[in-house]
Image (tube, rainbow, N blue to C red):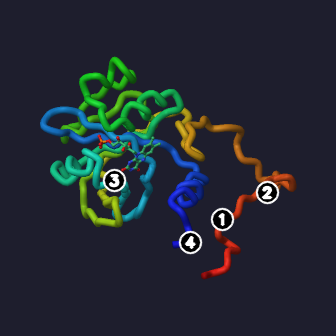
Amino acid sequence: MSVTPAEFRKALGCFATGVTVITVDHEGEVHGMTANAFTSVSLDPMLVLVCVDHRARTHAHLHARKRFGVNVLAENQRAISEYYALASQTHQDAEREAGAQFDRTAHGTPVLHGALAYLECRLRTAEDAGDHTIFIAEVEDVVVREGDPLLFFRGKYRAIGAAADSSSPALPSNSTIERHNLARPKR
Ligand SMILES: Cc1cc2nc3c(=O)[nH]c(=O)nc-3n(C[C@H](O)[C@H](O)[C@H](O)COP(=O)(O)O)c2cc1C
């Protein structure tokens, strides 16, 4: 294999994303998981996907419940992202440790207070892909709020900066481009 896992992660880290918390009801309790492998799939029907590691507790919960929420985090919700990225996290400590509070939708799905957007999702298909599963779901309801997003780029949380300016060059002349494997001869 010519690309190492570290190079793969580094390359993917260049793709700036928002941050979501996937919420699912698990036997009456709120279960949450921080995820940025989330994207839109189709407009008609309205489909989204999230990729979940086979080892995550959320993986089994999504299969069992077949319904989940996607909460797009606001800039001031970094502590919530950090909390729900912990394998040991429990609902009991979420409010005290990260300030996370929830309501329930009519379907019983937990909705995080203060998120920029909420999508109520009904599972359509689950496709294994390597060590993750791609969960594709139909969006049944959305809530959108004003505000700025929490971002994730090169392994760090970020805030949105100045708006991109169409008059600036796409690549400044002094920028450094790291190359991995692109010009490496095949063995
Ligand atoms: C910014 C960020 C994004 C993440 N994105 C994902 C993701 O898309 N899919 C995934 O399976 N894990 C992702 N993780 C890791 C999970 O949040 C982490 O493994 C969590 O402990 C799983 O929780 P669970 O076992 O309660 O489901 C991400 C972590 C961080 C910090």
Q: CA distance from mark 3 to mark 4?
A: 25 Å
Q: x, y percentage for residue 158? A: 59, 37
Q: Amino acid at mark 3?
A: Val
- The residue depicted at 47 percent of the width and 29 percent of the height is 77
Of circles 3 and 1, which is in front?
1
Q: At numbered mark 2, what does the secondary structure look like: helix, strand or loop?
A: loop
User: Is tag 3's residue or tag 4's residue first in the polypeptide sequence?
Assistant: 4
What is the three-letter code of the residue carrying label 1?
A: His
Q: Residue 99 has which mark?
A: none
List the single residue furthest toward the top.
96
Quadrant where the C terminus sits is: bottom right
* Crowding near the residue tagged with mark 2, few <14, some 14–19, many ≥20 C-alpha atoms within 10 Å: few
Q: Nearer the viewer, residue 83 or 178?
A: 178
| Disc 3, SS | strand
Q: Amino acid at mark 4?
A: Ser
Q: Nearer the viewer, mark 4 or mark 2?
A: 4
Badge 3 residue CB within 8 Å of ligand 1? yes
Badge 1 or badge 4: first in the primary sequence: 4
Q: Give the secondary structure at mark 4.
A: loop
* Residue that protrudes farthest toward the left in the picture: 27
- Dot 4 surroundings within 10 Å: few (below 14), some, or many (20 or more)? few
Foreground residue among 60 and 150: 60
Asked whether the residues under the numbered discs 1 and 4 touch, taking CB atoms below 8 Å apart as contact, a structural biologist would say no
Locate residue 178, reporting x and y percent. Answer: 71, 59
Disc 3 from disc 1: Cα separation:
27 Å
Give the answer, above or below, for where 26 lies relative to 15: above
- Which residue position is annotated with label 4? 2
What residue does disc 3 label?
A: 52
Give the residue pinned by disc 2: 171
Question: Residue 114: x percent and y percent?
Answer: 42, 28
Q: Amino acid at mark 2?
A: Leu
